[in-house]
Amino acid sequence: MSPVNKNLKKNKKRAAPAGLRVTSRTKPAGKKLKVTMTRGWAGKREDQLKVLRGLGLRRRMDSNLVPDNKAVLGMIARVAHLVTVEPAE
């Protein structure tokens, strides 16, 4: 492999998404979270679409305030690649 191709592979890393990093093991803080759908739902699996609807998100750039509990954090973790999360003020 030429040095040019090696550099292209190294630079393909994605930047970390803005906002909170939410996994299924994140501890709830007992407050509200603002969830925003940043990527569209076209071509996604049906279970991911149901999770987005459960979070109250209908279209791209749509936001909703949701409670910060384990059930909601698990839902966010399933569609983390489609949404951004930030604490509600």
Image: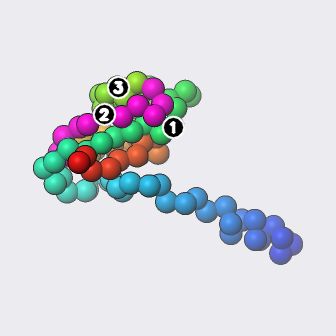
Q: Amino acid at mark 3?
A: Arg
Q: Amino acid at mark 2?
A: Asn
Q: Nearer the viewer, residue 60 or 74?
A: 60
Q: Position of residue 31 (x, y in %)?
A: 16, 48
Given contact means CB atoms under 8 Å apart, are the residues at marks 2 and 1 in contact?
no
Per the model, the C-alpha gap separating discs 2 and 3 is 11 Å
Q: Check disc 1 and report its element: helix, strand or loop.
A: loop
| As drawn, 4 above or below 38 | below
Q: Residue at x 16, y 54 (%)?
A: 29
Q: Position of residue 24 (x, y in %)?
A: 28, 51
Q: Based on the picture, tell me whether residue 27 belongs to the magenta stretch.
A: no
Q: Residue at x 41, y 31 (%)?
A: 62
Q: Amino acid at mark 1?
A: Arg
Q: Which mark, by number, is residue 53?
A: 3
Please say which color scheme the image uses.
rainbow
What residue did someone put label 1 on?
A: 39
Q: Position of residue 89 (x, y in %)?
A: 23, 48
| As drawn, 35 above or below 44 | below
Q: Quadrant of residue 56?
A: top left
Quarter holding the N terminus is bottom right
Task: Report the residue that reaches farthest toward the front.
Answer: 89
**Crowding near the residue tagged with mark 3, few <14, some 14–19, many ≥20 C-alpha atoms within 10 Å:** few
Task: Report the residue that reaches farthest toward the bottom.
Answer: 3
Per the model, the C-alpha gap separating discs 1 and 3 is 14 Å
What residue did someone put label 2 on?
A: 64
Q: Position of residue 8 (x, y in %)?
A: 75, 65
Q: Nearer the viewer, residue 73 or 57?
A: 57
Q: Which residues are magenta?
A: 59-70
